[in-house]
Structures are given as C-alpha cells and as structure tokens.
Amino acid sequence: LPKGFKERVKGMGIVVRELMPQLEILGHPSSSGLMSHYRWNSSMESISLGVPTVAWSMHIDQPMNAVFIIEFLKLGLAVGEWKGLRT
C-alpha cells in the first residue's frame, strides 16, 4: 500500500491485508450476493453455496467463465452491456 494510505482511509472503511475465509463469508446468512471477476475458484464457491453473482470479468479465463455462468447456467448477471465472446 502507498505510504500514508491507511491514515487517509481511516474511518471510511477497513483495510484487510491477509486472506479472508471466503467460504465462511459466502456461507453466512447475511451474504446476499457476490461481485466477482469470475475466476474459477470463486465462481464454484458461490455456485455451491447458492450465492448469486454479478460479473465484472476482465481477462484470461474470466470472460469465458462469465459466458458459461451467465448465458448457459443462468446463475449470474453481467455489469453493463455484455458483448459475449469475440472471435
């Protein structure tokens, strides 16, 4: 993190530097959805726990995973207009 970042954001949120127990968080009753970049692991975790997802895919396998989950499985939504796969 840039020097002074924690001081600048103090009181506006929380800075988490270590990994979080994602399955516990997704499985908690107050988790009503997940904004996801659609990497495969987080996609499978949210699907297995029945947590709806909103896709914000960027690169590598993420766009193809998003197509599969949104268009074929009908288990998520895309942020903005979905262009599908480009050939």
Image (cartoon, rainbow, N blue to C red):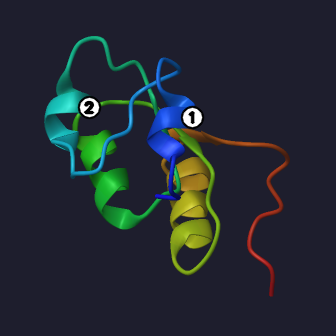
Q: Residue at x 45, y 40 (%)?
A: 6
Q: Residue at x 36, y 65 (%)?
A: 40
Res 76 quadrant in image: top right
Q: How crowded is mark 1: few (under 14 residues within 10 Å), some or many (20 or more)?
A: few
Q: Earlier in the sequence, mark 2 or mark 1?
A: 1
The amino acid pointed to by label 2 is Leu
The amino acid pointed to by label 1 is Arg
Q: Mark 2 points at which residue?
A: 26
Counting the numbered discs, the total is: 2
x and y, in percent, of residue 4 in the image: 51, 47
Q: Residue farthest to the top?
A: 30
Residue 22 placement, left or right of 3: left
Q: Residues within 10 Å of mark 2 (few under 14, many from 20)?
A: many
Q: Mark 1 points at which residue?
A: 8
Residue 54 placement, left or right of 86: left
Q: Which of marks 2 and 1 is in front?
A: 1
x and y, in percent, of residue 17 in the image: 29, 50
Q: How far apart are marks 2 and 1 (CA)?
A: 29 Å
x and y, in percent, of residue 47 in the image: 32, 42
